[in-house]
């Protein structure tokens, strides 16, 4: 499970002995691995701001703003002084080129991270994409570019084509999970 919202939450849902269990991790704080010249430039921009750059610095609400600021600087523009994630998504929907580029970069990085998590955890049954950013960005996540980047794993590319990416759209998935755990505890 990879949840993009106020941060980047990462966890495992495992079935052992006929029972489901969840394992929380701090996987969102793993280091960002750029996969293009633009992403290398973004890493350089964010490293100047933060030092070490984790995946959460790009794939979260604040990450959308960080990406927008970095891309603006790369283009030689002054980024807006104050911006919210909603400003970036609204700008993209309105056709603003920098906001669209930001959202596209977010999509690509999220896909790459999701694919890396599948490889790291052996999650061959699939990865659930959750968090507050998934519903508003669902059209972007459904873009074939997401799957292309998700599957772009070198020798494992063929295996990745069989791994589902599932968007969690339930408004309260945490409560649903807590109820399931409570029901299992009886």
Image (spheres, rainbow, N blue to C red):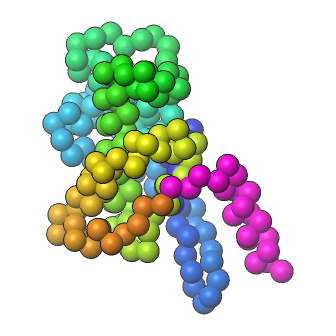
Quarter-of-image position of residue 140: top left
Q: Is residue 161 above or below residue 70?
A: below
Residue at left offset 69%, top offset 63%:
177
Residue at left offset 34%, top offset 60%:
115
User: Would residue 6 be visible to someone looking at this image?
Assistant: yes
Residue 25: image x %, image y %? Answer: 53, 59
Which secondary structure dominates the residues rendered in magenta? helix
Between 75 and 140, the one lying in front of the other is 140
Q: Is residue 22 magenta?
A: no
Task: Please give left or right for residue 139 compared with residue 133 in the image.
Answer: left
Residue at left offset 47%, top offset 45%:
138
Quarter-of-image position of residue 22: bottom right
Residue at left offset 31%, top offset 56%:
147
Q: Is residue 112 above or below residue 81?
A: below
Quarter-of-image position of residue 73: top left
Q: Is residue 175 magenta?
A: yes
Task: Please give left or right for residue 35 compared with residue 67 in the image.
Answer: left
Q: Is residue 112 above or below residue 77?
A: below
Residue 61: image x %, image y %? Answer: 51, 34
Q: Quadrant of the C terminus?
A: bottom right
Residue 120: image x %, image y %? Answer: 36, 66
Q: Is residue 171 above or below residue 16?
A: above
Boundaries of the magenta span: 167-186
Residue 119: image x %, image y %? Answer: 33, 67
């Amino acid at each position: 499970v990879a949840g993009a919202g106020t941060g980047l939450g990462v966890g495992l849902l495992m079935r052992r002995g006929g029972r489901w269990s969840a394992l929380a991790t701090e996987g969102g704080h793993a280091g960002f691995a750029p996969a293009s010249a633009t992403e290398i430039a973004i890493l350089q921009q964010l490293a100047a701001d933060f030092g070490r750059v984790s995946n959460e610095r790009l794939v979260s609400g604040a990450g959308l703003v960080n990406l927008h600021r970095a891309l603006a600087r790369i283009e030689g523009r002054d980024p807006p002084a104050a911006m919210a994630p909603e400003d970036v998504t609204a700008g993209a929907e309105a056709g603003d080129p920098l906001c669209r580029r930001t959202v596209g970069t977010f999509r690509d990085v999220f896909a790459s991270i999701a694919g890396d998590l599948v490889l790291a955890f052996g999650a061959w049954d699939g990865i659930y994409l959750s968090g507050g950013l998934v519903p508003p960005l669902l059209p972007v996540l459904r873009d074939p570019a997401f799957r292309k980047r998700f599957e772009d794993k070198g020798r494992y590319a063929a295996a990745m084509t069989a791994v589902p990416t599932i968007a969690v759209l339930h408004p309260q998935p945490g409560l649903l999970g807590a109820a399931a755990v409570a029901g299992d505890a009886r």
